[in-house]
Structures are given as structure tokens and as C-alpha cells.
Image (cartoon, coloured by chain):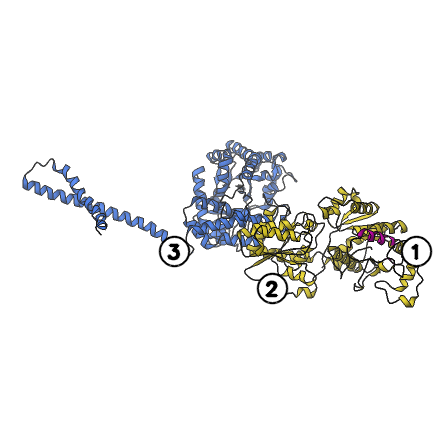
Amino acid sequence: MFGWEFPPKIYGGLAVASYGITKGLSLQGDVQTTFCLPKPTGEEEKFLNIINMSQVPVVWRDKNYDDIKDRFVGHTAVDYYRFRDHLYADFNYLQGLDDMGCIQFAGGYPGNLHEEINNFSIIAGVLARSEDFDLIHAHDWLTYPAGVHAKMVSGKPLCIHVHATDFDRSRGKVNPTVYGIEKNGMDHADCIMCVSELTRQTVINQYHQDPKKCVAMHNAVYPLSEEYQAIVPNKTPDEKVVTFLGRITMQKGPEYFVEAAAKVLQRTHNIRFCMAGSGDMMNAMIRLAAERGIADRFHFPGFQRGKQVYEAYKNSDVFVMPSVSEPFGIAPLEAMQCGCPCIISKQSGCGEILKNVIKVDYWDIDAMADAIYSICTNESLYQYLAEEGLKEVDQITWQKVGLRIRECYNQLIGRGWFDNWEYLEAVKNI
Amino acid sequence: MKQICLYFEIHQPIHLKRYRFFDIGKDHYYYDDYENERAIQETARNSYIPALSTMLDMAKSGEGFKVAFSLSGTAIEMLEQYAPEVIDLLQQLAETKCVEFLAEPYSHGLASIGNEESFREEVKRQAKKMKELFGQTPKVVRNSSLIYSDEIGAICADMGFKGMIAEGAKHILGWKSSHFVYSCAQDNRLGLLLRDYNLSDDISLRFGSQPITADTYCDWINGLPEGEDVINIFMELVALGVFQPLSTGILEFFKALPACARARGIQFATPSEILAKNKPVAPMEIVYPVSWNDEERDTSCWLGNTMQREAFAKLYDEKIVGRILACKDRRIKADWDRLQASNNFRFMTTKPASAGLYRGIYENAFDAFTNYMNILGDFLKRVRDLFSDQVENDELNALYTQIANLGEELSVKENEISRLRARLDKYEAKEKKAEADAEEKPAEKKPAEKKPAAKKPAAKKEAAPKASPKKK
């Protein structure tokens, strides 16, 4: 598996989904996952093998085992020597090689992203030659070139996982380079897993893929940890809090949230709005809130991490996700786990599997304002959405998603059905 | 001898329009006129008119065809406005004397489980409307969607109805058969006719997918055990034409029914005739309300989730109902009827069986709830604004009775005044006569002079109090 993010380092939904998928697969017992990351922290969970792409050699360097054995994060020195036996070309011209002959990654999303993607693909060539595997699974466009390269070398089937497309990120104005990488990856893939039917349609229509090889593979959530469950909400009884949580950027539709808030605040005064997160449109949103004259009831607490996110959910009465185009959107599922009713845009992929949420068009600020007002004023609607939502989201587990992915795998590599009945039964009863 | 009792419900919901919360307090018109006109005309064209015309022919042919109808008040209002030809047809049917009209709550609402006083008022109002339109005073009553429980039965018996129709649900009947007349457990004056859901659904639900002929159908009825004589077939009139499109030949099936029935010695009868001919065999105890809706045959499709229950509680809040009943505002009363319609609650159902349910203009239950609560919010505000919040309903009623009483008191006093005045006139006339006799003037002119003389003192009396404040 090639991935760009993995917990504990979380930049967005990609890390969470990558973790869920690998964990769901590992629980089946007979799936062994090797996850290739540009720069792991060494604190990843041990249910899978981690390969640190920053420590895979691409040029031969004479190194003594005793000198380097303690320097590895992720894989070990033994792996290093095995990789070194499978170099396939002379990459001495590359800049940024270290003394072990490895290419360094900055991690995250640096300015020279395209260069890093290319390097990632070069290293994948080494791995494809040295490792033994049945199938390649590449997460998100950054790792598609690596996946394609590995397929070319090994001839093993390639499965790519579309967590988002550039059409979602850019509201239709795609970056041609990114589009090229995505299209190339999809063209070479044997199976395209899309996180929602919405994304699947984008892949079919905008990337011209064969519908037969595209499957909708909805995400899931992990049950709340005890630490998060124990968070006691700190609510003021006579005031309601409506929350937006996510990157404040065009894709997430923050301006619609501000406009809806302005509509609600024209009629009521016991509601506060909170726009948590950061992003390129944050300043514009602060200005917009001021222009609408609601700055006294509209708050920007900034970027939330870890536990703060769940505190925000628990303290909210309504969670709003007005995304213009959201491939899946795990946030509403997390909010529902905390018993917070959700309003999501119809343009969100998670809406396809959720029933106990209110769905509105992202541009329909009247409907959005109406829904916010209704949840805040009608206790019964709040109760119903909170209780039934929690029940519903508890049924959406990564184990189930893992089984569906497994089915696709089996078809790709020509294996029979997964027949661990005990496990199947256990998953069904969750 | 076996008797078929046919009954059709005529009801169409009045669709509410999209109403946002910022309209509260500004916009007091709640209806989607376009959708209402379209829906009722479509229904009339596809179902009501062809079905009623067929029945009119059947009734006129003298083959002993009998049928019963009930119309909700809101449906009548809509039909009068958008499809008056349906009312005409019903009136022609009424003239054939083969048709009985039943009473039901005017709004097709849930007042029977929400507020007894309002329920009584609504049934009376609808019965009056039936009398006006069709010249019949209903003797048998049916509740919205056949909701029935012992308490509702007792209220109807108390109102003087002889019978009521209800659902022959499996869980209330058990081993018993719906083919007898039963009586209400709390008041044995009220006879109960229970719907045979198998035979009814054979027509209204299954006719298109499992077609049957009138012969087979009458054979089934004829094959029922000896003594099971009352076959109650109740459905909505839209079953003929909407649930089962006309292309299924459902009207031809209906036309053939009387002849096939007569060949087997089966008669048609209206609910009143059934009740007159058959004595109740036993009381039927129904503690929890039953209805003809859904698999459960209970009230869960209207009051199944918390949202529905909140809306219901707010709508039938005792103080609100009291005020609405006391007030004289016609628009408020009309809105009240329309907001009560049970369809509004049905739109909010979240039952799994509701997957393919028709939800009118709404997308889902939450949408329906939000819109309804916005409208209800505005409506309740209008009702509260009618009277000061401190006034309790009892006081309000007391005030109203006081006003009514004052009127009576005034009229009593007026009578007394005129009586006294007449006596005064007589007395003065006598006095004058006496004076005249004494002065020996001509007696003929005197009566003419008396009247103006008598009025003058009264006029002076009136003027006197007015003058006194000026002096101050």
C-alpha cells in the first residue's frame, strides 16, 4: 500500500481513512499490509509493516551494519540491505541524497510537492523489485505514480483509492498537472475505489473511466476512544452553539455558513456560531461576518487538533458541513458519534449512507438557516437526530468496509470468497 | 343472508407551502395553491369522477346497489373550489336514496386522541355540512383513518350516533370474525362495523397485481361460514383510479358486482341498514387506538417518533384549543382545520415501512417537521395574540358566557321596560281620561294626544343624565 498520511500525524481525512482501511483489513487475520509512507514518525501502530520511503536507498552506498542499525524509523537495517540489492538505475544525479543513498522527504505538503511525488515513484521501483506481494493499493493522487510504477515492474494488479479528485478541490477549475497524474493513475488501475457514488460519477464522467472498474467504497468511523467518550459537554442551557469544523477553503463552502448564520441571527439571539479551522479563506470570512454585523455572535477559534475536535463536537448543538463538493466527509460521522445533529450539503458523499441528518443544497442558505433554526428551537428534532444518529453511525464500521475491499481484492487476484465465517458473523453483529 | 357494506373515504390533504422561519409573524398564508389545485383536479379526473359516475349508473339501474361515503370538511372545501363537479355527482347520488353519508371529524385530524371537546365540535360541524349538501343527517360516524378506541366510541355514543366503523385488526379480533356487528365496550348503544381488511385490500391494494373477477370475489363472500353475514369493505375512493389505475379494469369489476352478488343471494346495505337489521353479538374491547394504517394498524404512523409527538402536543395544547374554540376569527378556525389534518403528521414518519411513502412537497421527515413547525409557530403566535396570556381558558369561557348572559339579561330588562311603559301609557291614558271627563272635553281626540305625551317624559329622562356631566 502506498500512502501519504498516516496517524498519528494527521493533516486531513486521508490519514484517518488510511488507518481505518488497513486496520479493517488486518483484523481479517490473513491480510498482511505493508504501508509505504514518505516520512513516518515511528509512533505508528504495529499491526502493519511500515516502510520509511526516506530510508530506502536508490543508489549504492557502502555502509557498515553497526554504523547505521540504530538510525531506522519504520523498517530495519536488514530491510535496507535487501532494498540495496535491487537498485535498478543510476540515480546519482538526484539532489538531496543522504549518506545512505536515500532521498529525503519533507513530509506533509511542501512547496516542491511534484518533485517529491516523482521521487516517491522512483523509490517504489526499488520496492517493487525487492518485495513479494499480491496486490498494489495506492491512496490518493500523490501516490498514483508510485502505484503505476510498481505495477509496471511487478505486473501485479493495481487498485487505487480515490479519496478526492481535483474537481472537488477546485470547483471545476482543475490543475492540469494534477489532472494528468490522476488520469494516468486511473487509466492504469485495475480497480478504482471511490469513497462515494458522487466521486465515482466524477471519475466516470470527468476522467472517462470504465464504470465496471469503479466501485463506491464508502468510508466508516472508528468507535470513540474512552478518553473522548468521557468528555463532559460544557453547554450553557439557554444558548445554542452551531459549529462549522474544517479547512476554511472554497471546497468547504464556508461563506454559505456565514450567510445562513446571518439569516438565523436576524430572528433569534440565543444562538452562537463557531467556525473552527483555518485556511485561505479565513480572513475573508472574518470580514464577511463583520459586514453582516454578526461578529458578536460569530467566533473563529482557529485550528483544532486531537481532543479539541471532539470537545467542539460535544459542545455543539448543531454541526454544519456546507461543502460545495465533498468526496466523502468523515466529520459529520464523528459529530454524530458525539451525539451532535448534523446538517450536510447534498453534494457530500457521506450523505449517501446517512439517513438521520438534514441534507440541503450547499447554495440554499434559506433551507440551511431553516434547518439550524429548527434544530435549535425544537427539542424533539434535536433529540431524535442525536439519538438515532448515534445508533446509525455505530453501524458504520471499518470492519465492514474491510470486508468489501477484501471482496474486490479477491476478484483482482482470482481468489475465492473470504470464508472466515466466525469473523463475518462477528462483524455483522456489531 | 349475506350483506356487503361498501364504504369509501373521500379525503385529500391540503398541501402546506414552503414556509421558512423568517416568514413567522410576517406571512399568515400557509398553503401551496398550485399543488392543491393540481392534486385535487388530477385526483378528480383520474378517480373521483369516473368512479362516482359508474356508481351513479349502478344506483340508477335499480339492482340494489348501496354504498356509503364520508367526506372530510377540508376535502369538501377543496372540491367546492377546484372540482365542483364531484360535489354535483355526490348530490345526484344522494338523490337516488341508495347512498348514506357518514359523519367524521371535519379536519381529518387526530382530535379524537388529542382533545375531546374539539373532536365533538368537528364532528358536529361536518354532520351539519352533510345535511346542507346532501340533505341527510349522518347517524353513523367514522373517525379519521378509522382510529378507534373504547373512549372514542363512548364519546360518539354520547353524541347520539348509532354506529361507528373501525378496523378489524388482527390483534384486536384474535379468533373472532369481523363479519358480525359488535358493540362498544363502554357504551352498548353504539354498534361497531369492523373492516374486513383481506377482502378490502384485495380490491384497493392487490387488484392490479392479482386481478380477480366479480364472480370469484362473490364466490369468496358466499363461501364464508353460515351466520357470518356482514361483510364490511371499506377503502379510500382513490383506490379506484389512483391506487389501482382505471386501466386495470377496476370499474368494470365494480359494475359486475351487483349482478354477481344477486345471483348468489348477496345484498348490498348501507351501515345504518346493517345496524338496524343485525343486533350486536358482543362488546368489543379496544383499549389502545387502532387504525387502518400500516402493518401495525395503530397510531404509530402519526405519533411514532418524538418529532411527531412534539408537534402533536403543541397543536393540541389545552390552552390553545380552548382559545381557538372560544374565538370568532374565521381565518384562525380555517387554518386550525387544515393544520390538524393527519397527513401533516404522516409526512413526518420515520418508520422503515415509509420508504416509498408519498410525502407531498417534502423530501423527508425532517423537512416535513421543520416546515410544519415553522407554520405552527406562526399559527400559535396568532392564537396567543388573540387574548392576553394571563387569561385562563376557564376565565375566557366565563367571560364569554357572561357576555352571552348579559345579552339575555338585557333582553329581559328590555321586556320589562316595555311592559312597564305600556302600563304607564295605560295609566296615563286613564288619568287623562279622568281629567277629560272632569273637564268634559271631546273624547275622540284624546287617544291621539296621549302617545306623544307619554314619550316626552322618557326623552327628558334620557337627556337629563347627559346634561349633568356638563354642569360639572
Q: Earlier in the sequence, mark 1 or mark 2?
A: 1
Residue A75 relative to residue B23: left or right: right
Q: Which residues are magenta?
A: A101-122
Quick one: label 3, few (<14), some, or many (20+) residues within 10 Å?
Answer: few
Indicate whether residue A106 is drawn in magenta.
yes
Which residue carries the number 3 mark? B395
Cα distance in 3D space between marks 2 and 3: 44 Å
- Determine which quarter of the picture holds residue B213: top right
> Which of labels 1 and 2 is toward the front?
1
What numbered label is drawn on residue A234? 2
Q: Which of the image's four quarters has the N terminus of chain A?
A: bottom right
Quick one: label 2, few (<14), some, or many (20+) residues within 10 Å?
Answer: few
Residue A266 percent location from the top left of the image: 54, 51
Quick one: label 1, few (<14), some, or many (20+) residues within 10 Å?
Answer: some
> Which of labels 3 and 1 is toward the front?
1
Q: Looking at the picture, which amino acid does disc 3 mark? A: Glu
What numbered label is drawn on residue A87? 1
